[in-house]
Amino acid sequence: MVKKTNKNPPTKRKAAPTQRKQTKKTKAKAPADKSNFSNFEPYKIKRGEKYLNESQEKHLKKILIDWRMNLMEEVDKTVNYLQDEASNFPDPADRAAQEEEFSIELRTRDRERKLIRKIDSTLERLEQGDYGYCDSCGIEIGLRRLEARPTAEKCVDCKSLDEIRERQLGN
Ligand SMILES: [Zn+2]
């Protein structure tokens, strides 16, 4: 929750609607949720190319690093956004709306931080050659899936099974 003393208490005009409009107008745009990264050129697989050869690894590594950078920027933007927007609304409804908005922002930032940690550990695995094969059954996760989900640790089938199990456990 953000509390800030208001140095300029609002004057008692009843022109609340116009005031509110102004706040809306100057409002910074909330940063977008970047839980998925798609800003890359799909890799062109040459015939007979080995799975996760050097250039495929380089390609995936670049996606991970770009994605990480992108997330870091989003985290920064969220921080700036929260600072810019930390104004004191005299109207309790406005204040409540802002607090709600802030808590959504903070959750988004939390998710972004977790993703960054996940990307870091993925980059580490890539470095150690422990990457691209399913943790459960050992098959190739596949380049296309890794492009779409570079942090994937399981193949589509095992991942789906996990999700079904989770649902059955009433998670
Ligand atoms: Zn699997």
Image: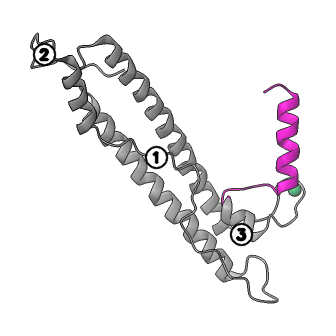
Range covered by the magenta-colored residues: 149-171
Q: Secondary structure at mark 2?
A: loop
Residue type marked 1: Ala
User: Which part of the image, by quadrant, shows the N terminus?
Assistant: top left
Residue depicted at x 78% and y 77%: 51
> Which residue is found at the position 88% from the left and 36% from the top?
165
Q: Amino acid at mark 3?
A: Gly
The residue type indicated by label 2 comes to Pro
Which residue is the site of mark 1? Answer: 32
Quadrant of the image occupied by residue 91: top left
Q: What separation in Å lies between label 3 and label 2 (alpha carbons)?
A: 61 Å
Residue 152, above or below 81: below
Write the residue at 84% across / 42% down. Answer: 162
Q: Quadrant of ligand 1?
A: bottom right
How many marks can you see? 3
**First in residue order: circle 3 vs circle 2:** 2
Left-right relation of 149 to 119: right
Q: How is the image coloured?
A: one colour
Q: Nearer the viewer, mark 3 or mark 2?
A: 2
Density class for disc 3 (Cα within 10 Å; few <14, some 14-19, many ≥20) is: few
Quadrant of the rendered image containing residue 93: top left
